Image (cartoon, rainbow, N blue to C red):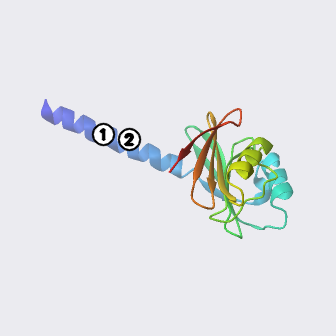
Amino acid sequence: MKRILSLTLALVALVSLVSLGLYAANDRVIQSKQLPKAAQLFLAKHFAGRAVSLAKEDRDFSGTTYDVRLADGTELEFTSAGEWKEVDGNHTALPLTFIPAQLVKTIQSQHAGDAIVHIERKRRGYQVELASGLELLFDARFQLIGYDD
């Protein structure tokens, strides 16, 4: 019985590894013109003049996302529809033009002079990192609900 259980577990582990490998094989480098139209427009509007150094399509069991790295080191992640999910300036200030105005207003009033360097859309709101390293959590109605360290 132990031998059958061991063989079954080994088989399950092997199938899992092969499945993960197949999903990883679905990641591919693409041209920026192959990004969803909404992502292309977003980049042109909010990151004009910044060259795309890498664009990648990531396909897995949960769907397709697009990862973009700009020449200045900024990293962006888009949904399959081309909406931004995460923007990371890698310790460099992000443009405020795409960040909801209510978030910007709250941050500027409570943390004046501290630039936004990372923002991520979460299932129930937003997570924002400031240049000081402070992380702020906002709900879907743009209300500050807490801090994360």
Q: CA distance from mark 1 to mark 2?
A: 6 Å
Mark 1 is on which residue type? Answer: Leu
x and y percent of residue 72 in the render?
Answer: 71, 70
**Vertical position of residue 72 compared to residue 131: above or below:** below
On the rendered structure, is 78 left or right of 38? left
Q: Nearer the viewer, residue 44 or 122?
A: 122
x and y percent of residue 131 in the render?
Answer: 63, 61
Quarter of the figure that contains the N terminus: top left
Return the mark for residue 15. 2
x and y percent of residue 128 in the render?
Answer: 64, 49
x and y percent of residue 3 in the render?
Answer: 15, 36
Neighbours of disc 2 within 10 Å: few (<14), some (14-19), many (20+): few
Label 2 residue SS? helix
Return the mark for residue 27. none
Mark 2 is on which residue type? Answer: Val
Residue visible at 57% across and 54% down in the picture: 134
Residue 106 position by quadrant: top right
Q: Are marks 1 and 2 in contact (CB under 8 Å)?
A: yes
Neighbours of disc 1 within 10 Å: few (<14), some (14-19), many (20+): few
Q: Residue furthest bottom?
A: 71
Label 1 residue SS? helix
**Vertical position of residue 26 compared to residue 92: above or below:** above
**Vertical position of residue 12 compared to residue 112: above or below:** above
Return the mark for residue 11. 1
On the rendered structure, is 105 left or right of 149? right
In this view of the protein, can residue 85 be seen by the observer?
yes
In this view of the protein, can residue 56 be seen by the observer?
no
